[in-house]
Image (spheres, grey):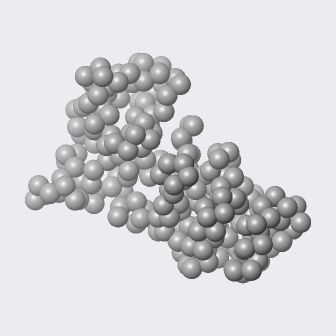
Amino acid sequence: MRDRQLAEQICRACVDGLDVHGAAISLLTGSPSRETLWASDPTADLLEDLQFTLNEGACMQAASTGSPVLVANLHDSTDAQRWPVFAAAVAEQTDALALFALPLQWGTINLGVLDLYRRTPGGLSPEQSRDAISAADVAALMMLGVRTEPADRDGDGDGRDGDGNGDGDGWLDPAVSGRAEVHQATGMVLVQLDVDAEVALARMRAHAFVEQRLLIDVARDVVSRKLRFTDDMA
């Protein structure tokens, strides 16, 4: 639920600020699986389904390459030839003309894709492109936190709310929790990789995301020396 709320906030901000008609965020949950976290409207939702069903389109290319895919006019012959089945389906079933797919990526980890569409042809301005890429970067880092941290309503870092339940909603705070294991593991990983604390924490989050584990569990493995980070691992 927390990641869907985050996806909704990011998509709404993109629609309001980037002169696009719709937005969606899909999370990659394993090849070729995916989960649409939130879509602003039925067209955005259908575009997600078409791309993953047909296994082609801007979203699929962004997910596989880790680079933004910006299509100013899907009816242009070049893009129609690049994704012939998808382009035909979009023309037949939707009124979308321009598509902009921004990967949610940290390092080599592809978490998902932020998809934007317009009903009119035309590319993003340089300023809009920068804002869209920034939104995707923020979404990627926050999604790592949401997917690898338990909720924490009272902010004490134990993953529980004030009543001792584990379903709190303190997920918008990107700061490191107060758990000693996370701090200790971050220090160990920064030595192992020769990076700063922020990068070390992000590497642990990325690893937790890929392994579908909580950050605290990865941290405990690092502290107990069951897990050692190297440059060639997530």
Task: Give the percent coordinates (x, y) of residue 66.
Answer: 64, 45
Q: Is residue 100 visible?
A: no
Residue shown at the point (10%, 59%) measured from the top left: 163
The foreground one among 33 and 44 is 33
Q: Residue, x 29% and y 28% (percent of image)?
A: 221
Q: How many marks?
A: 0
Specify the quadrant of the image occupied by residue 162.
bottom left
Q: Judge whether residue 5 can be spotted in this image.
A: yes
In the image, residue 144 sits, relative to residue 230, either above or below, namely below
Of residues 221 and 180, which is closer to you in this image?
221
Question: Residue at the location (11% across, 55% down)?
Answer: 164
The image shows residue 127, relative to residue 120, as above or below, that is above
Q: Position of residue 71 (x, y in %)?
A: 77, 62
Q: Position of residue 199 (x, y in %)?
A: 47, 32
* Quadrant (top left/top right/bottom left/bottom right) for the N terminus: bottom left
Left/right of residue 58 with respect to residue 166 in the rendered view:
right
Q: Is residue 55 above or below residue 90?
A: above
Task: Determine the image quadrant of residue 82.
Answer: bottom right
Q: Position of 112 compared to 76: left or right?
A: left
Residue in view at x 60 percent, y 74 percent: 46
| Residue at the outermost left position | 163
Picture coordinates of residue 154, whole percent (x, y) = 19, 55
